[in-house]
Amino acid sequence: MYHRNRVFAAACLGMLLFGIVFLSLGSVNNMLADRFSLSDNEIGTLTALLPFGILAGSLVFGPVVDRFGYKWLLAACALLVMAGLEGMAFAATRGWIQFFVFLIGFGGGVLNGATNALAADVSEGERGARLSLLGVFFGIGALGMPGTLAMLSHHFALKTIVAGIGAVAVLPVAYFLAIGFPPPKQQRGAAPPRARFALLKHPIFLFAGLALAIQSGMEGMSNDWMTRYFRKVTLSGEHAAEWKTLLGLVAVTAAMVVARLALSWLLKRVRSDAVLFSSIGLTAAGALLLAGSTAYGTALTAALLIGAGLAAAFPIVLSYVGDLFPEQSGTAFGMLFTLALIGNMTINKTFGAVAQVHGVKQYTVVMLVCLAFSALLLFLVTRQVKRSSSKPAHE
């Protein structure tokens, strides 16, 4: 037997760890650039490796949790994240850094997909609001990395702080092992593994995957490049105070946390499509403000708008899919995150090449282009949701 709230708490702890993973590279890329003399293009390679690891984890988790359940997979991948962070702190060569970035990504990819599927499984009737609340814990974990580095960098070496953050993963592991989880779905007659490919025949599923691919790319680009943008553009110097560059990343993440907390209340009262398109407008306003800003305070305000605007798409789109495919949540979410992370890798690596030639300032241009495509795809998703609302979820 299992208790719904305890299981949801486990999902929140796993998502907190994924937040640490997702912001890990963005928090330390200046440290790594200095240690290994990395160019912007080489940093772009690292920022593509992290989502590549997350992609690998996303490919694995769906069939595994549908067949074997959540407990042991969550515990094992939390330990992988711990090992990867310790390795990132102390690795002495570029090759080892690349390996540990991938390892962190793999463990985080499993945690991300599995915790979203787990939260959807135990949140019938309120998936949008609960997935938004789950996203708050992503933000708390994400804030923990740059926030802790910013607070303690005056007193400790950055690698020591990263190692300490990695050690925190022991606590979620203990909790995962102590509680009960829902039984594997295959015991309840879930579809065979090859049925996952049939999901791609559903227009809403395909449009959702493409929309999340762009959304993931925008989030990844913001998380991985915001500190670089603040150092090279806003503060215009390679020797800018580290805490000032980190505050740009903290602003993005903090705004996302607050926005998702608000969404857990708002989505019970306001139409989800209205929230989606309002969020696109908010992100666009932030990107335009950042492009025109010359003052540090204005740039921080722009980062807050970008973070708040990026908060809505994932929980809302995932809630649509969770409602339509409840008996294949692990498999369906796994495929969505796979598509999303392909977009993340592609956009991150492309932007690394753009930044190498034209400068990091092009971040705002790339964001606005991505937002235009995102708006079109989310329009198609919401239209398909309305068409499907009067039909059976799926066969």
Image (spheres, rainbow, N blue to C red):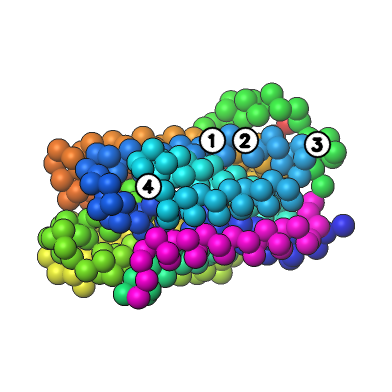
**Disc 2 target residue:** 60
Answer with mark 3 or mark 1, whichever residue precedes in sequence. Answer: 1
Spatial CA span between label 2 and label 1: 7 Å
Q: Is residue 319 left or right of residue 7?
A: left
**Disc 4 target residue:** 92
**Disc 1 target residue:** 56
Residue farthest along the right direction in this orientation: 1
**Disc 3 target residue:** 186
Q: Give the number of the mark in front: 1 or 4.
A: 4
Tag 3: amino acid = Gln
Spatial CA span between label 3 and label 1: 22 Å
Which portion, as a residue range, is magenta?
Answer: 155-182
Quarter-of-image position of residue 235 = bottom left
Tag 4–tag 2 contact (CB < 8 Å): no
Classify mark 3: residues with Cα within 10 Å, few (<14), some (14-19) or many (20+).
some
Answer with mark 1 or mark 4, whichever residue precedes in sequence. Answer: 1
Tag 2: amino acid = Val
